[in-house]
Every structure is written in structure tokens, then in C-alpha cells.
Image: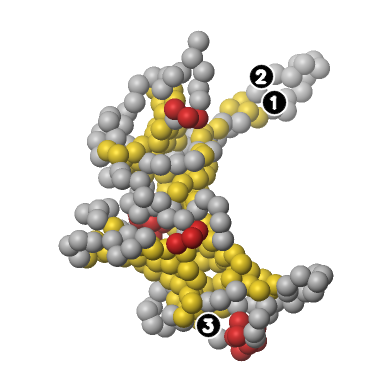
Amino acid sequence: MARAQGARAQMALAYETVYGTPPVSGFRLMPFARATLGSEQPLLESELLGYGRDPLAPIKDAVTADGEVVIPIDVEAFGFWLKAAFGQPTTNGTTPKTHTFQSGNWTLPSMAIETAMPEVPRFAMYSGCVLDQLSWQMQRSGLLTATPRLVAQGETIAATTAAGTPTALGLQRFGHFNGTVKRNGTALGNVVSAEITYSNNLDRIESIRGDGRIDGADPTMAGLTGRIEVRFSDSTLVTQAIDGSPCELEFVYSLGANASFTFTAHAVYLPIPRIEIAGPQGVQASFDWQAAKAASPARMCTAVLVNTLAGY
């Protein structure tokens, strides 16, 4: 009897034309490290009396399909997740191509994602996947990954794949070594770590249906928050926090002229932090920042991915 192993698992992704309807072609093979994407349907315990001490059979509740995927931040495949987070990008240039994603879109694309365990076999197709949140961390060392959080409409299990033969992408990963944090265009020194979280704050449309699934997941007010941990060496950030004025934070990864990723929060507000002296080692300060819509450009954030892919 075959036993499922993560080493043989695969993930394929394609955008849907109609919400909740997987396309018949156009799937791409996605690199991933972990996935909790799944569907569950809990049971409701019977509350009825008068039938003795033993309970009656439980009743099925509504279906919930969601989860997270841990993915590498790479040169090509990461753009598909950025499109899910921000909507269709603007693509310019010949070689390389510059794909610009902007916050503020009212509509987001839905995706069909299939996870495959071929040795069982089990092919789970998740339709109507909409990206709720995208987060990642910057630090000095380790593997650079991001975590998209998804809300799906439902799950369909089959013994054969519905994704055909997915198109494989070239895998070229960014690393923490390639990262830089800039404040108002100038490299910000003494940064120990940084966290970035973009949220679409999806509203699940929980209509009454015979199959127990949702009717959709609509984006509401977007949010962009994070944290920067810095060695306390000057009062630049503290002064900004006291003044209440915004700054522009830019998170950059570069592998050369043809491969880069730049995420810019155009108006970042910093809280006044507590400066603690924890011992004889260096003093650090943490800023839990929040971003808002800037005056120019009139949006909250911009993500720019440079590669040789024709488009998304």
C-alpha cells in the first residue's frame, strides 16, 4: 500500500475566469515548502431529548475551505501570488520585463489550486481561492519565504489530476543576503529584522446553499502593517514617531539587472516605542508600523517584480 509523502507532493495554480470554476488548462507548477490548504465540515451534536441517554446521529455543518501556503520569494513564481494579492499588474519593457502591482484594486482574481499526492492517489482541487493575506520576514540569514493565506470556495477530490501537465517555471530564489531596507530612498542602518503583512481582509459571502459552500470572498479595507527591529543608535525613527509624520519604507531584493523585487510602503507611520535596557548587550527598539494611503502616489503600496516572464 502506497503512503503519501510530502517529498512527492506537487501544487498547480491557474486563474479562474468564473469564480469557483477551475479552468481546463493554463496551470503552472508552483514551488512551495508547506501547505495547510484544505476543506473541513464539522459535525453538530444532536441536542434532542427524549430518546434515552445515547445521543442521536450528528448533523453536518457548513463547509470551510481555507489555509496557508509557505512559498519561496523567487523571481518568477512569486508574481502569481502578487497578482492574487493586488490584482492585474502593469507590465512594461522588453528584456527584462517590469511588472508593477498596486494596492487599491476593488476586484481580485480567483484561483484554482490543485495539490497532488500521486502515490495514494489523491488530487485535491480547491476552487475559488482568493488571497486574504500575504506576509514575510526580513532577517540576516536563513531561507527567505512568504506565507499567502487563502480563502477557498470548496474542495473536489479525484483519483486523477484535473490540472493536466502544469507548465514549470524557472526557479531563482532571492535570499536574505540580497535584501535591503530603505527609508525615504536611503538605506536604513542597524536593522536587525523586519516583518511585512499585507491584508485584503476578505468578507466571506456565507449565503444559504445546498452544498454548504460560500458564494464568494470580497475584499474590504486593505491593511499594511509590520515591524522593524533596530539597534538603537540614533533618534531618527523616534523623532519621526513623536512628530507623527510618515516616511516611505522600501524593501528591496536584487539578483542583478534582470531579477529584482521591490516592495514600497509609501506612507508609513511609526509608534513611539518603549526603549528597554535588557542587560549589557546592545539596546534594541521595535517599531510596529502601519501604512496608509499616501498623497503622492495616491496609494498605500507598490510591488515591482523584474524578470524575463512575458506577463501574468
Q: Is residue 88 above or below residue 165?
A: below
Query: Which image quadrant for residue 276?
Result: bottom right
> What residue is pinned by disc 2?
57
Q: Secondary structure at mark 2?
A: loop
Q: Is residue 230 above or below residue 38?
A: below
Q: Position of residue 61 (x, y in %)?
A: 58, 32
> What residue is pinned by disc 3?
246
Q: Position of residue 274 (x, y in %)?
A: 74, 76
Write the residue at 25% across / 34% down.
24
Q: Position of residue 31 (x, y in %)?
A: 41, 42
- Furthest residue in direction left, as rendered: 94
- Residues under labels 1 and 3: Cα distance? 55 Å
The reply to whether callout 1 and callout 2 are in contact (CB within 8 Å) is yes
- Looking at the image, is mark 1 or mark 2 earlier in the sequence? 1
- Disc 3 residue type (three-letter): Pro
Query: Which image quadrant for residue 243?
Result: bottom right
Q: Is residue 192 above or below residue 85?
A: below
Q: Which mark is residue 46?
A: 1
Write the residue at 49% across / 41% down.
33
Q: Relative to residue 180, is residue 93 drawn left or right?
A: left
**Nearest-to-viewer mark from 3 and 2:** 3
- Disc 1 residue type (three-letter): Ser
Q: Position of residue 70 (x, y in %)?
A: 50, 45
Mark 1: few/some/many CA within 10 Å (<14, 14-19, 20+): few
Q: Relative to residue 95, is residue 279 drawn left or right?
A: right
Q: Secondary structure at mark 1?
A: loop
**Nearest-to-viewer mark from 1 and 3:** 3
- Residues under labels 1 and 2: Cα distance? 7 Å
The reply to whether residue 150 is visible in this rendering is no
